[in-house]
Amino acid sequence: MNIQRHYFKRFPIELDHDVDPDPEHLKAVDDNAPDPEVSAPDESTMSPEEYSKAMKLFQSRQEAVEFRKKVSRSSSSFITRSGEASA
């Protein structure tokens, strides 16, 4: 899981899949800093419309995290013990 944690610090979910982080962002990455806590929106502090939008954004973010984790796991299965990609 440390590899995924390092990945998400360098390639945040908010960054599109086809965009590389800029050098300044990469230099600023602190692997020792705690990860920000992302919590579900609080319905009691929002209007129904705001809550609906916030939940859609939250769910979309969670789906992106799960997708990238699955890609990471499936990609690692292509690496052999010698470190070479398998065909």
Image (tube, rainbow, N blue to C red):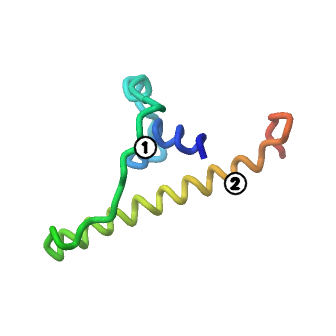
In the rendered image of this protein, does residue 13 appear above or below residue 25? Answer: below
Identify residue type, mark 1: Pro
Comparing 68 with 29, the one in front is 29
In the rendered image of this protein, does residue 19 appear above or below residue 63? Answer: above
Residue 27 located left or right of residue 53: right
* Picture disc at residue 74: 2
- Element under label 2? helix
Coordinates of residue 29 in the picture (x, y in percent): 43, 29
Coordinates of residue 63 in the picture (x, y in percent): 47, 63
Residue 31 located left or right of residue 38: right
Q: Which residue position holds label 1?
A: 12
Residue 37 located left or right of residue 43: right
Residue at the spot 36% in from the left edge and 51% down from the top edge = 37
Residue at the spot 69% in from the left edge and 54% down from the top edge = 74
Q: Quadrant of residue 58?
A: bottom left
Identify residue type, mark 2: Ser
Residue at the spot 55% in from the left edge and 53% down from the top edge = 68
Coordinates of residue 38 in the picture (x, y in percent): 36, 55
What's the distance in space between the residues labelled 1 and 2, CA to CA?
Answer: 20 Å
